[in-house]
Image (tube, helix red, strand yellow):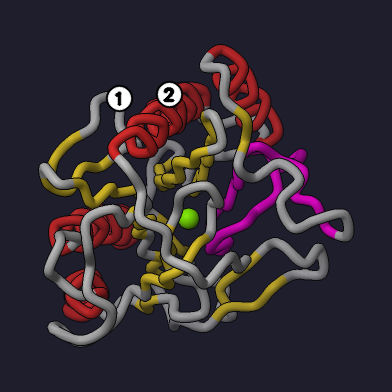
Amino acid sequence: MSGTRVITKKSAADFDKMKIAGRCVAAMHSAVRDAAGPGVTTKELDDVARRVLEEHGCRSSFLGYGGPHSPFPGVICTSPNSVIVHGIPDTYVLKDGDIISVDAGAIYEGWHGDAAFTIAIGDVSDEVQNLLDVTERALWAGLEQAKAGKRLGDIGAAVEALAVPHGIGVVRDYVGHGIGRQMHEAPSVPNYGTPGKGLRIKTGMALAIEPMFNLGTDRSVVLDDQWTVVTADGAFSAHFEHTVLITDEGSVVSTLDEPRYV
Ligand code: MG
């Protein structure tokens, strides 16, 4: 997925719309989280998310993404177990011991919000639960670096630092991104980097930070459907994401029930 290379400065009014989109994403997350469990298909989770979009007067950022040749068919991405990202909701039945990553995007009056989480279905091993915990902590470590005057390398380094002590593979083929009138805008926001290096973060930017961590190596493969990205070694993968707005008053995570300053 790629978008424009131009970084547009968002106004306070633009950010207000992105917060409404973000609240819709948060509502999609909680509804899908409540619905997920053994015996439920990923398509049923997509149906749940569709209803929330309608209730909030938002459209999906994902449905139809990719253009006429390979339009994404879901309103959410559902990525079980070894699927890293971009899994298509289908007849897959969740079972005890699975994990499922859910990525949701919503558009309100042309402005986007984008966020993802991974949950365990029933009982999972300590190793798998640790993967989920570490990936979520890495997201928040990255968000805390997303402040005016910092650089993109500060975000990437903070995210990567959480993975290293656990021998976790940090996916490099897919990265976070700017977000606004398009879901994917410049700049790219890698989950690795060097502190003090890279593009300087400024007010008016909006970033989607999204660590993708694997229990095995970082290597990935795209399946024949041209969407589903899986780990090359079949190991489980986790994905957590939030959208953060760099405002004059500070940096605020928009994809929550209530926006939260970091
Ligand atoms: Mg994203």
Residue at position x 14%, y 83% in the image: 195
Classify 133 as above or below 167.
above
* Percent of width and height locating residue 165: 17, 79
Image quadrant in which you'd find residue 176:
bottom left
The majority secondary structure of the magenta stretch comes to loop
Residue at position x 36%, y 48% in the image: 10
How packed mark 1 is, by other alpha carbons closer than 10 Å (few <14, some 14-19, many 20 or more), is some
In this view, the residue in front, 190 or 4, is 4
User: Is 84 on the left or on the right of 29, as rendered?
Assistant: right
Residue sitting at the far top: 55
The residue that label 2 is drawn on is 27
* Percent of width and height locating residue 115: 42, 45
User: Is 51 on the left or on the right of 14, as rendered?
Assistant: right
Magenta residues? Answer: 70-93
Q: Is residue 79 magenta?
A: yes
- In which quadrant will I find the N terminus? bottom right
Measure the alpha-carbon separation of dots 2 and 1. 7 Å
Q: Is residue 262 visible?
A: no
The residue that label 1 is drawn on is 257
User: Is 239 on the left or on the right of 65, as rendered?
Assistant: left
Tell me whether the residue at label 2 lies in contact with that at label 1, contact meaning CB atoms closer than 8 angstroms: yes
* Percent of width and height locating residue 60: 62, 35
Q: Is mark 1 within 8 Å of ligand 1?
A: no
Q: Is residue 112 magenta?
A: no
Mark 2 or 1 closer to N-term? 2
Image quadrant in which you'd find residue 89:
top right
Name the element at disc 2. Answer: helix
Image quadrant in which you'd find residue 125:
bottom left
| Amino acid on which the number 1 mark rests in the picture | Asp
